[in-house]
Image: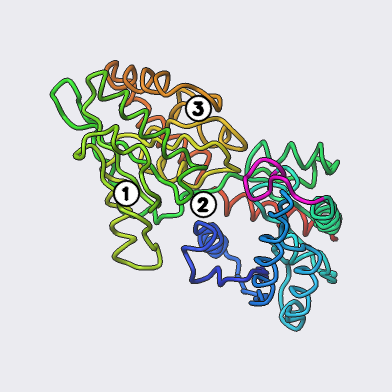
């Protein structure tokens, strides 16, 4: 059975774009017996050139503008290879612009990490959008959802938006968590540090967007931990932003790795090596639809400390694989909880229960199995 995946990057080979979600989705589907066919759509240079010009122009008037979604949908449809659509049994759509003008009798499955409508005034890039941008978003999503046989929701937050903002019936919504965008083979978590013996506690921060992922907050939390007697070392992975508060930490209290490319075997091995040596993940993100880094941490049994915002509560369960705090929580409160977990030995328990939670709730094997059951249900409805 063939699944046609409409996307602007090759999901069969590119493990870096979209955090690797599409690459590992394809691997999961092929593992349960599906053949995945990439149906490419083009993104034209002049789209981005014009968008950049308009964005700068609108900023002069204190407004934000997203790329004209209807316009992008038109060009996406123009570049679509309809002959390829005829060769597949089901169609998987990731971007709303790639499905708006889609005409097909094949069952369509929409696959996102959130509704774009729920992201308005949540992410910085979708804050202060023009009225026509907001109208475009609602129109495009509504039409795509209407023509979809199923919509995969990556979190409870996502599912709630589908129900409340678009009145999607329950039977069309399939809740499936993402998995870790790493290969499960050979995962060997290191034992958690014992600070009473003076060992270093290796704290991992993952995030390209330094501000949104809470980079400055992570440094403040580590400063508090050091003040409280924890020999903390912050490992900063993904971001190359200036460390505005790095002067608060000793020069030997943090290491910056920058952005690693998972398509590069050397960078991929370095990434997994850093994960295997981490005692906890500290990414106090202020806006997150899901958070692949949470799945990756749980795969290694790394306890997570973050904010509960957006869809993160579906990936970080208090007392199971870490703790989520309300956005705005003080750095000292974070530090107190982390120190308590280290001193009491709870961090070791979270490592074990976190790995179990990953195996039972948030991995790509489970995704593939649920996807297969969903396809079987759609096929039964078509009889």
The colour scheme applied to this rendered structure is rainbow
Residue furthest to the left in view is 197
Q: In this rendered view, identify the residue nearer to me: 162 or 371.
A: 162
Instruction: Decide if residue 190 is on the left or right side of residue 183.
Output: left
Tell me if residue 120 is in the magenta stretch.
yes
Residue range highlighted in magenta: 119-130
Q: Is disc 3 surrounded by few (<14), some (14 to 19) or many (20+) residues within 10 Å?
A: many
Q: Is residue 196 above or below residue 168?
A: above
Residue depth check, mark 3 versus mark 2: number of the one nearer the observer: 3
Q: Are marks 3 and 2 in contact (CB under 8 Å)?
A: no
Number of numbered discs: 3
Identify the mark nearer the N-term, 1 or 3: 1
Instruction: Quote the CA–CA distance across marks 2 and 1.
Output: 15 Å
Instruction: Decide if residue 110 is on the left or right side of residue 320.
Output: right
Residue occupying image coordinates x 36% and y 44%? 243
Q: Secondary structure at mark 3?
A: strand
Classify the position of the C terminus by image quarter. Answer: bottom right
| Res. 339 visible in picture | yes
Q: In this rendered view, identify the residue nearer to me: 254 or 30.
A: 254
Mark 3 highlights which residue? Answer: 324
Percent x, y of residue 363 = 50, 47
Classify the position of the N terminus by image quarter. Answer: bottom right
Q: Secondary structure at mark 2?
A: helix
Residue occupying image coordinates x 30% and y 27%? 223
Identify the mark nearer the N-term, 3 or 2: 3
Mark 2 highlights which residue? Answer: 364
Q: Is disc 1 surrounded by few (<14), some (14 to 19) or many (20+) residues within 10 Å?
A: some
- Res. 187 mark: 1
Residue occupying image coordinates x 72% and y 40%? 159
Most common secondary structure along the magenta stretch? loop
């Amino acid at each position: 059975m063939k699944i046609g995946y409409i996307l602007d990057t090759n999901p069969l080979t590119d493990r870096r774009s979209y955090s690797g979600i599409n690459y590992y989705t394809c691997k999961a589907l092929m593992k349960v017996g599906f053949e995945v066919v990439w149906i490419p759509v083009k993104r034209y240079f002049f789209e981005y050139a014009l968008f950049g010009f308009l964005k700068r122009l609108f900023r002069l008037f204190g407004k934000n503008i997203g790329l004209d979604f209807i316009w992008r949908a038109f060009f996406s449809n123009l570049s679509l290879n309809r002959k390829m659509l005829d060769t597949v049994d089901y169609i998987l759509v990731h971007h709303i612009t790639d499905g708006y003008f889609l005409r097909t009798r094949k069952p369509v499955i929409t696959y996102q990490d959130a509704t774009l409508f729920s992201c308005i005034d949540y992410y910085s890039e979708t804050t202060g959008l023009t009225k026509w941008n907001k109208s475009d978003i609602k129109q495009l999503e509504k039409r795509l959802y209407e023509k979809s046989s199923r919509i995969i929701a990556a979190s409870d937050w996502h599912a709630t938006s589908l129900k409340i903002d678009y009145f999607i019936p329950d039977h069309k919504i399939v809740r499936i968590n993402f998995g870790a965008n790493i290969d499960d083979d050979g995962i060997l978590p290191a034992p958690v540090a014992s600070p009473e013996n003076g060992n270093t506690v290796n704290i991992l921060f993952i995030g390209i967007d330094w501000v949104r992922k809470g980079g400055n907050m992570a440094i403040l939390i580590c400063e508090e931990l050091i003040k409280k007697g924890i020999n903390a070392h912050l490992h900063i992975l993904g971001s190359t932003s200036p460390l505005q508060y790095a002067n608060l930490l000793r020069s030997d209290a943090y290491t910056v790795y920058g952005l690693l490319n998972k398509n590069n075997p050397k960078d991929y091995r370095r990434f997994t090596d850093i994960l295997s040596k981490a005692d906890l993940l500290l990414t106090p993100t202020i806006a997150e639809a899901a958070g692949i880094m949470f799945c990756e941490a749980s795969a290694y049994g790394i306890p997570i400390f973050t904010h509960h915002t957006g869809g993160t509560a579906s990936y970080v369960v208090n007392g199971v694989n870490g703790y989520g705090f309300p956005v705005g929580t003080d750095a000292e409160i974070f530090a107190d909880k982390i120190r308590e977990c280290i001193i009491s030995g709870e961090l070791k328990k979270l490592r074990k229960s976190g790995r179990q939670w990953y195996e039972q709730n948030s991995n790509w094997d489970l995704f593939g199995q649920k996807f297969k059951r969903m396809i079987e249900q759609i096929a039964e409805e078509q009889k």
